[in-house]
Image (cartoon, coloured by chain):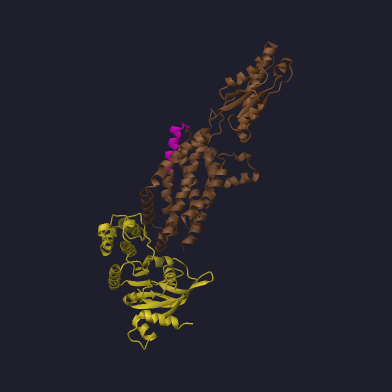
Amino acid sequence: MRWLRVRELVRKEFIQVFRDKRNRPILVLSPLIQLVLFGYVVTTDVRDIRVGAVDHSKTPESRRLLESFDANPTFRILYRLEDPKALDRLILRQKVDLGIWIPPDFQAKVRKQKTAAVQVIADGSMSNMAAVRIAYTSNVVDGYNTRLLQEHIKRKIQYGEIDLRVRTWYNPNLDSQFYYVPGIVAFLVMLLSLLLTSMAIVREKESGTMEQLIVTPLRPFEMILGKTIPFILIAQAQMIMVALFALFWFNIPMKGSAPLLMAATCIFLLSTLGIGLFISTVSRTQQQAMMTNFFFIVPFFMLSGFVFPIANMPLGVQWLTHLDPLRHFLVIIRGIFLKGTGIAVLWPQFLELAVLGGVVFAGAVLRFQKRLD
Amino acid sequence: MHSEAVTVTDLVKRFGDFTAVDHVTFTVRAGEIFGFLGPNGAGKSTTIRMLCGIITPTSGSGHVAGFDLFRQPERIKESIGYMSQKFSLYPDLTPMENIRFYLGIYAVPPSSWKARTEWVIRATRLESVRHRLTRDLPPGWRQRLALGCALLHRPRLLFLDEPTSGVDPITRRHFWEFIRQLTEEGVTVFVTTHYMDEARHCDRIVMIDAGKIAAIGKPSEIIQKTLPDRPGADLQEAFVALMRGRP
């Protein structure tokens, strides 16, 4: 083990990475652009519900029901129609998200103290969004019911009420950006470290310089160090850059310890660099390496809990997610950013990530040695 | 130093069903220029790649620079220089950066880097382009740089795989002069080529075809042995005659 060799390899790698003019925007600009794009695009908040209303009752009661929708900042009644069929067409063309049809007998039933039916039609093609919209709709109708009841009885209802006082911790406004932006930071670090490592080695194979290196006394382990140290440094720099951007652009709170986050990034990189090394041992060309990268990136993304909650997955798949380094890193990075969680709580994730990284990296190193001989 | 720089016995390399090198036995003496001649696909590159530890032989035995081919490949790598037919330095680095990189990789003590760099730059006549990108140099200049980088650690044994392919005649002549100069300093040179006329620069040669040795010895001896009745014949004719004589 000669540090001189590792040092010169690292030095050469840095010269190559930064000399390539195409690399500079990829390293600096593209993470920021992706963060901004993802930060605004990946959101599950339901903020604006466009409504088409058909009022066949045309009575003070039915108008008050529609007014209570209009008064709610989430709802916007865009169309008032006569024909329920026109409502179908509007939903089909995605001009509205929700249709409300008040039948002619609405007032009569309410006044006779019977249950009056109101039809709500939701576009279920995006099931989660539809469920949230329906829940908001029920809230508005509940409010309307309560007011109706109070006016009818004309005095305060005498029974002990349950007063729910909900406090949302860590993200008081339930802002989904808070949840997603730290995840995007993690995802970008994974993407870049995987791609850079595997490409850097496969490029040497493609250009024939690998053959020249094999003829030198450079040991496989020195080569691995020389090829991973630059990308650990670059990935850490990107982590800091992207995290600062998340703090100041998206105003994501940083409640926890920055050194802990850096330590977690290092452990996380052990897995991604290991996989990058592995990919470089099975690929001959940069194109092959690229395809193999996607073979890893897509499942890691899907199983990480980034968008799809792990708790909703089948049990077998839930176990599988433990093999996904991004899953553990997401828990850590969200914990540190939003909750200020420390190692006392996050140690299981740290442990799993370290074991996973150790195994993957060791495996890659063993395979790498075989290939170099 | 051993009097034999390279000795191999019954060296075999198979790729699946295909036998690229078939029971090859020869010796390279210290201080000579040893030529490995044969047409494309004869097994020249495979042999040189086995001797340098890039690929593992299927069977056989051998020593390179005094070290066992199978048990001490890393020691071999410290003692040899290698230049391949494919240009294999970093095109996005300058000659100076390439030289510094290989000085580091061969763990040459940094105190002698400056002198060693100047020596190589001068010997390969790259003074005027030392800070240009290697990618922008003409092929002959790049080849000289590759040769220079293979000599940075002062190897006693130099392997050159088709060093002159695709290089103009004047550069080729300069190249052989330089190689001769190296052997005068005691370096052993093992060189493969498919140019028959280059054999005259070699002290001894092996002629290889389809993985088997067809002839071995001094070029003049081979001609004489193969075509005893034609005193003016050249190596090309001897080679053709050798091929014709085979089943």
Foreground of the two, A152 or A10: A152
Please state the extent of the stretch shown in magenta in the rendering. A238-252
Give the position of the N terminus of chain B as an image quadrant. bottom left
Q: Is residue B94 magenta?
A: no
Residue A335 visible to an observer of this rendering: no
Give me the residue at 74% from left, 15% from top: A112
**Residue A139, placed above or below residue A111:** below
**Residue A100, placed above or below residue B197:** above
Q: Position of residue B175 (x, y in %)?
A: 30, 69
- The residue lying furthest to the top in this view is A154
Give me the residue at 60% from left, 47% from top: A320
Q: Position of residue A221 (x, y in %)?
A: 44, 57
**Residue B181, placed above or below residue B129:** below
Q: Position of residue A159 (x, y in %)?
A: 69, 16
Q: Quadrant of residue A150?
A: top right
- The residue lying furthest to the bottom in this view is B229
